[in-house]
């Protein structure tokens, strides 16, 4: 591919540039997208379910945007047809983790439709789920300059304002309040606002807006689980369990039902009863395995590894997950499987590095490097580089460790390690800014429990 073909997206996009170079020199070197990540992002991501809900919500709204193009106010019909086909192509490309065709397709679309809010939005969506939140935010702002009342862009921008390198909760909340205004009577905007208010630390506001969503639709399971998550973080465990049970009772899919059960199991850890939580997670993983629900099997198994009370149990669980994810998994996309396997290997690298077993940590990092090279997936690339950061930190190469850890700062555990690196380097201002960023990752997840719970004495 010509080096300038993707320059619109690669300027300031370090990970993309690195992977473009990989494509040109795959025999020389090996080495998101969230989703995402990201996964998210699928998750490997820190906020696995939050990211999954945001992913589903944004994709539904992107579908609305495409539907709107079927009835344009003006413009040749042939342009609409090509536009729809190409937009769909953009949305499908990241599922395979293939970065290069996506960049080429989007650059071509932007050249042909530079002021089309739907093209800009779908491009922003792709950047967002490749975990390039800063550039996603910039493009969403451009989208809203063209159409200030474009609901999907306002929704995603609200999240991007918090997930970008310099979080801005005031703008995030303002964007989502405008989203609510433009979609009266709809539960999704209230759900989004409830989630962002929780991230911003306004638990009471979060509860109120989740409640508004549920008044509009009592079966809106994302809001029901979100409300329970907020109540968990407020230490209101009894009401949190009640809300999880209500979510389970209205779940229309096994994955939604299992996720509510998973979140309910985590309440025991917050409550200070890890043994009970581990039993529930083990049972949930077994049920998911029997019913061939791979996402829940990974989610529950990975939490068991993270929350294990000793290294033997953690590595045993990681080994089990590695075997489960080693080849194609029925019911799970390859991009999600790769990101999940990457998360397993990164956690192995983190655990070995923290115990001073640098050779074992390096071996896990090498596995990740090969996976990143094979998949050419930016989310996997970020997982690999952050795992490398753990290993470098353990070896005393703190400066390079900080550079590598900086690729995945939406993960609370990675960000905590990055803060330690900044402090060791004497970068007090940077550490303060990172601590501010860390507080906006607040969610009822296993990763956040390990960060926040360790500070409160709840985590092992």
Image (cartoon, rainbow, N blue to C red):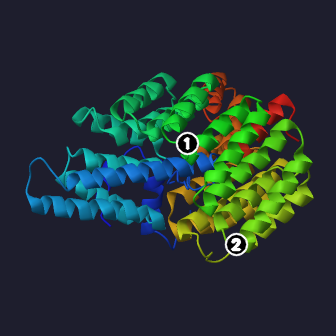
Q: Which of the 4 image quadrants contains residue 5?
A: bottom left
Q: Mark 2 near mark 1, Cβ–Cβ under 8 Å?
A: no
Residue under pointer 1: 218
Residue under pointer 2: 291
Q: Can residue 126 be seen in this view?
A: no
Separation of residues labelled 2 and 1 (CA atoms) = 27 Å
Pointer 1 local density, CA inside 10 Å: few below 14, some 14–19, many at least 20: some
Which residue does the image show at 83% across and 29% down from the upper left? 456
Residue 331: x and y in percent read: 58, 72
Q: Nearer the viewer, residue 26 or 385?
A: 385
**Number of marks:** 2
Which residue does the image show at 88% across and 41% down from the upper left? 460
Which residue does the image show at 56% across and 62% down from the upper left? 31
* Disc nearer the start of the sequence (2/1): 1
The quadrant in which the N terminus is found is bottom left
Q: Can residue 146 be seen in this view?
A: yes
Pointer 2 local density, CA inside 10 Å: few below 14, some 14–19, many at least 20: few
Horizontal relation, residue 345 to residue 37: left or right: right
- With respect to residue 160, does 124 lie above or below? below
Q: Which structural element holds mark 1? A: loop
């Amino acid at each position: 591919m010509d080096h300038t073909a993707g320059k619109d997206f690669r300027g300031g996009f370090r990970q993309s540039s690195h992977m473009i170079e990989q494509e040109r020199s795959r025999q020389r070197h090996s080495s998101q997208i969230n989703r995402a990540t990201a996964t998210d992002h699928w998750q490997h991501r820190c906020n696995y379910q939050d990211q999954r809900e945001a992913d589903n919500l944004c994709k539904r709204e992107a579908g609305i945007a495409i539907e709107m193009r079927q009835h344009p106010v003006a413009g040749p019909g042939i342009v609409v047809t090509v536009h729809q086909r190409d937009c769909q192509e953009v949305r499908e490309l990241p599922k395979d983790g293939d970065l290069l065709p996506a960049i080429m397709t989007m650059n071509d679309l932007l050249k042909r439709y530079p002021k089309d809010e739907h093209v800009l939005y779908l491009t922003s969506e792709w950047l967002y789920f490749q975990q390039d939140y800063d550039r996603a935010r910039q493009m969403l702002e451009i989208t809203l300059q063209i159409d200030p009342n474009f609901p999907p862009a306002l929704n995603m921008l609200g999240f991007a304002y918090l997930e970008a390198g310099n979080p801005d909760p005031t703008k995030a909340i303002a964007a989502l309040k405008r989203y609510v205004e433009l979609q009266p009577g709809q539960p999704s905007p209230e759900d989004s606002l409830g989630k962002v208010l929780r991230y911003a630390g306004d638990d009471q506001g979060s509860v109120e807006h989740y409640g508004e969503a549920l008044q509009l639709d009592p079966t809106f399971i994302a809001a029901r689980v979100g409300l329970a998550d907020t109540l968990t973080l407020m230490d209101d465990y009894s009401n949190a369990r009640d809300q999880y049970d209500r979510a389970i009772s209205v779940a229309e899919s096994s994955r939604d039902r299992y996720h509510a059960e998973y979140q309910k199991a985590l309440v025991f850890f917050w409550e200070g009863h890890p043994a009970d939580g581990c039993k529930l997670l083990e049972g949930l993983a077994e049920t998911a395995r029997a019913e061939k629900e791979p996402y829940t099997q990974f989610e529950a198994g990975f939490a068991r590894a993270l929350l294990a009370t000793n290294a033997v149990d953690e590595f045993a669980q990681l080994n089990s997950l590695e075997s489960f994810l080693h080849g194609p998994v029925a019911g799970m996309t390859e991009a999600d499987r790769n990101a999940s396997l990457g998360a397993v290997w990164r956690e192995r690298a983190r655990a070995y590095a923290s115990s001073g077993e640098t050779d074992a940590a390096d071996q896990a990092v090498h596995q990740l490097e090969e996976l990143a090279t094979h998949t050419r997936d930016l989310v996997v690339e970020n997982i690999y580089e952050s795992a490398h950061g753990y290993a470098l930190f353990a070896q005393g190469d703190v400066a390079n460790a900080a550079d590598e850890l900086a690729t995945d700062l939406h993960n609370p555990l990675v960000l905590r390690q990055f803060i330690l690196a900044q402090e060791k380097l004497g970068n007090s201002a940077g550490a303060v800014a990172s601590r501010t960023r860390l507080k906006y990752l607040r969610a009822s997840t296993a990763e956040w429990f390990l960060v926040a719970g360790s500070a409160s004495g709840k985590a092992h």
